Image (cartoon, rainbow, N blue to C red):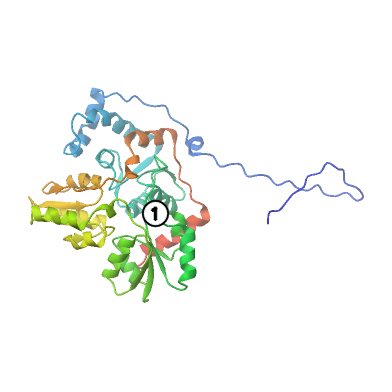
Amino acid sequence: MTEMVVATNEAPTGEARAAPRRRRRAAPAKTAAERFGVLPRPSLEYTPEVAAATAHLYEKVAHVIPAIEWPFHAPYVKAINDLKKVRNAVILAHNYMTPEIYHCVADVVGDSLQLARLAEKTDADIIVQGGVHFMAETSKVLSPEKTVLIPDGKAGCSLAASITAEDVRLLRRRFPGVPIVAYVNTSAEVKAEVDITCTSSNAVEVVESFGVDRVICLPDQYLARWVAANSKVKIITWKGSCEVHERFTGEELQAYRDADPSVRIIAHPECPPDVIAASDFAGSTAKMIDFVKHVPAGGRVVLVTECSMADNVASEAPQVEFVRPCNLCPHMKRITLPKILDALLEMKEEVVVDAEVAARARRAVERMIHLKN
């Protein structure tokens, strides 16, 4: 019930009464732009100075970015790297970011949780999230004192969008007493409603940590099936999926194997079961990268994941030839160098998580982090 305060102009009668105190309305929180200020736009000409300052960075991406394209990227790369020092900012780049972001302006690279955990340890004031919105929320949850920006607020995720906090509460009522595990690829509000989070790397370990017969594992149905296949725990799942990984098919992969029986096929657990069955190895993003690094020189690899990841891993495994039946993530591709520059100049778009939600979400994440402790 809302408390109502009625104001009156009538003078008090009889015994003098203390004037009622008026409640002061809290001043609206200042925006990031108001707190840090807006900076003028730098020149974005490709000058000899810009070319010289970015030459060492182009060497990292020359195998995937044609020389004719570099004069467009280079001025942004230099301007962003200069601005990071002015703003005391770090840029986090998920493995699905394009090479000019991943290799040329990022300070921290990796999977979504790895990015947030490493950013937590920096002394930066500002985090710019090269990834999608739930990743920026996770960074804010683990670093509440830092300002978190996402260069495009519309960079969402089909998997994270497949479930809401209310859905989790309904599952609680339907399956009372059954532990609920949420993939980190979920919103802060969903994380706040579950018992613990997991990654694709530790999902089996997390599920088995409860020591019970049944566990709810959400929202990715394919990751849940993969966990069920690798555990004796009965898994109750949600019908969510990643639009990038679910488009692959086992038939598609079999065609690559028929063309070259020596090819190594590596898939993410977010892929459908027929894709996992057709693969030589299935594992988290970090484990996929590690597998590729150990492929003998001259080996051919089919990396069943988002397109940019193959580009980024190629620089770390130059001995491997990549066959790329990849699918683009339209949400990740919303993050570009021009938008990162705008974010740093204008301090937009700030990611804010309700304090109570953030505290509960942080507990779910930290339970996973400290699982072995």
Counting from the top left corner in percent of width and height, residue 315 is at 18, 44
Residue depicted at 26% across the width and 29% down the height: 72
* In-front residue for pair 307/14: 307
Report which quarter residue 55 is drawn in.
top left
Q: So how many labels did they put on this image?
A: 1
**Quadrant holding the N terminus:** bottom right
Residue depicted at 42% across the width and 27% down the height: 40
**Quadrant holding the C terminus:** bottom left
Counting from the top left corner in percent of width and height, residue 144 is at 46, 50
Is 144 on the left or on the right of 256, as rendered?
right
Does residue 294 appear in this view? no
* In-front residue for pair 274/155: 274
Residue depicted at 74% across the width and 49% down the height: 5
* In-front residue for pair 134/294: 134
Report which quarter residue 215 is drawn in.
bottom left
Residue of label 1: 160
Is 251 on the left or on the right of 206, as rendered?
left
| Dot 1 amino acid type | Ala
